[in-house]
Amino acid sequence: MSLDELRALIDRHAPRDADAVPAIDGLMLTRAERPTGPRSGIADPVLALVAQGAKRLTLGGRIYDYEVGQYLVVSVDLPVSGQCTRASRETPFLGFGFRLRPARIAALLLETGTDPHAGGARRRTELPALAVGETPADLVDAALRMVRLLDRPADIPVLAPMIEREILWRLITGEQGTLVRQIGLADSRLTQIGRAVRHIREHYTDTLRVEDLARLSGMSASPFHRYFRAVTALTPIQYQKHIRLQEARLRLMSSTDDVAEVGYAVGYDSASQFSREYRRQFGRPPGADAARLRNADEEVLTGQ
């Protein structure tokens, strides 16, 4: 019954306008009436729960499929490709998402005295940044009560923070609890790699030095490189390339700059290398891809 009500609420409240501002900070509702092609974007730390249909995320060479009765956790900012794989006009894809904020996870761990290494996970230092789990009924119930608040906006300031804490608690004590707890720990490998990830995102046009990133993360170069790839499924250089190409795609859609200018603007020294890597990433040369995106509403550049 909880899942049926959650579906009805998402179906009613999911924004039809991609630029709509959510009424509850951190809440994301998604609805799609047909399967979509892969959509490239940056996935922030988030809980994504499927109420109806199915979805796929691709990170590097790893594929994560999840459907009704399952949820996905993303623990650091990642360049992913996402698509709805099961959706129709009669049975649309319906998804619930909630941003995972490290400070709030850390506060909950401190307040409850929860052992961050519970479950024998003390030695699991190479956690992947994405994981899929089976959705327990109490997590569905908490998600439902969060979405119900959209019908009672006066309750949002008081009740939304309380329900967010419950959602975090269900995750912390659930199947993917080890991964979620690491998000809130300042000294976890996940958080250390997160510092490098944020640095690359903020300085993606700069020349990248692995030694500098390792120092920023508090590690020597060799273990840093190993942990970075274990967490993100990409090397630091590959991660930077993904960020550059996604930024280039956004610029090509929203400006009249020529392809070479965009390539130089995102950090490439060679227009031919930029075009070659862009085509390998997105399947078309930059100019042709941008023209298609401008004229086709089924292609979106952001997505979870």
Image (cartoon, rainbow, N blue to C red):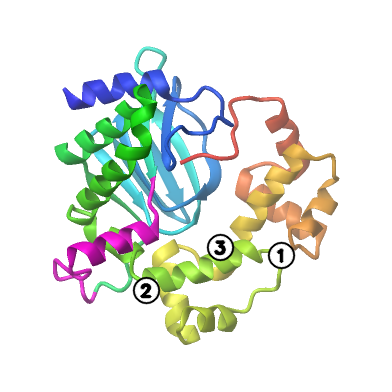
Q: Quadrant of residue 11?
A: top left
Residue that appears at 46% across and 67% down: 194
Q: Looking at numbered disc 1 in the image, what kind of residue is underneath it?
A: Thr
Residue that appears at 51% across and 81% down: 214
Question: For the magenta stretch, what is the residue range?
Answer: 99-123
Which secondary structure, mark 2? helix
In the image, taking residue 142 as reference, residue 184 lies left or right, namely right
In the image, taking residue 23 as reference, residue 147 lies left or right, namely left
Of badges 3 and 1, nearer the viewer stands 1
Contact flag, marks 3 and 2 (Cβ < 8 Å): no
| Number of the label disc, if any, that sits on residue 239 | 3
Q: Residues within 10 Å of mark 3 (few under 14, many from 20)?
A: many
Cα distance between the residues tagged 3 and 1: 12 Å
Residue placed under numbered mark 1 in the picture: 205
| Number of the label disc, if any, that sits on residue 189 | 2
Residue 231 place in picture, x, y as percent: 40, 65
